[in-house]
Amino acid sequence: MIKIAIYGKGGIGKSTTASNIAVAFAEQGMKVMQIGCDPKADSTVNLRGGKKIPTVLELIRSRGAALTLEELVTPGYAGVLCVEAGGPAPGLGCAGRGIIAAIEKLKEKKAFEIYRPDAVIYDVLGDVVCGGFAMPIREGYAEKVFVVTSGENMAIHAAANIAEAVSNFRSRGYAALGGIILNRRNVPREDEKVAELASDVGSKIVGSLNFSSVVQQAEELSRTVLEAFPESETAAEYRKLASGVLAACGE
């Protein structure tokens, strides 16, 4: 089973990237589970035609001991298994606890043994790699971390911090950095700056995505690019990226 976590600065396109990679994997015949680790609970929304699913925290509160595995996991487009950790209301409690609760509940219900996914993708909130937000790359839940960045200075700064955190975790036997994903925003020296970042953190660019209105068009339809525009150049880029991620996972 391939287990990956996708991190990056808020708004950099992690969920879009994760969902399209998930579909690309599914197109190759893989059974995929995507776990949204963001209190907004919108990681899997484009896999569900714009429909949000109940979060693990909501279900724990409402169902208690009666909660079933089938309630935790909802099928989405291309058969991708969708899970949303959820979180507390803003200002009430620690958002990272939702991730911890979700992963622990999935483990308790033997989700991975029962569904037996070929790939699990953790889509993690922003550039925070501490507390509950570090959970996916600890304890063997994810084996490889991929960082999404553009050439914008704040995105690169966040990516460097994430890479450093992953390196520190790696020294304890946790997940390793699988590579950098370049999501272009057409800023000056973008490719060069991201290549420098990859070199600085001892990694590589596993795939790149050109800035395209097709992504926004697909999101307006509440679909992934691979569902809405499967023959587009952007869809081909996501498929190529998915292949790069798989190759990095095999290293």
Image (spheres, helix red, strand yellow):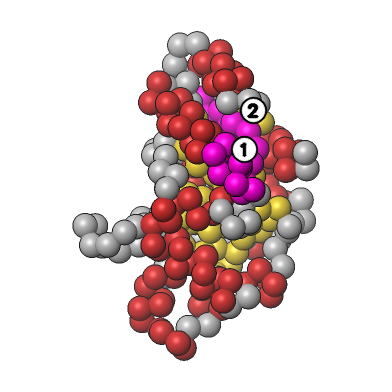
Q: Position of residue 226 (x, y in %)?
A: 61, 45
Please tell me how crowded label 1 is: few (under 14), some (14-19), or many (20+) other residues with Cα within 10 Å. many
Question: What's the amino acid at mark 1?
Answer: Leu
CA separation in Å, label 1 and label 2? 7 Å
Q: Which residues are magenta?
A: 166-184
Residue 226 relative to residue 148: left or right: right
Label for residue 203?
2
For the residue pair 49 and 38, the one nearer the viewer reads as 38
Is residue 217 left or right of 145 when viewed as pictured? Answer: left
Residue 207 position, x and y percent, is: 64, 30
**Rendered residue at 55%/63% (across/down):** 82
**Which residue is identified by label 1?**
177
- Residue occupying image coordinates x 48% and y 67%: 102
CB within 8 Å, label 1 to label 2: yes
Mark before the other along the chain sequence, 1 or 2? 1
Task: Give the secondary structure at mark 1.
Answer: strand
Examine the rendered structure and indicate whether residue 178 appears above or below residue 93: above
Is 181 part of what is drawn in magenta? yes
Q: Quadrant of residue 170?
A: top right
Given residues 218 and 127, the one toward you in this image is 127
Where is the C terminus found, in terms of image quarters?
top right
User: In the image, what residue occupies the spot 76% across and 51% down?
Assistant: 28
Residue 120 inside the magenta-drawn segment: no
Which element type, helix, strand or loop, lies under badge 2? loop
The three-letter code of the residue at mark 2 reads Ser
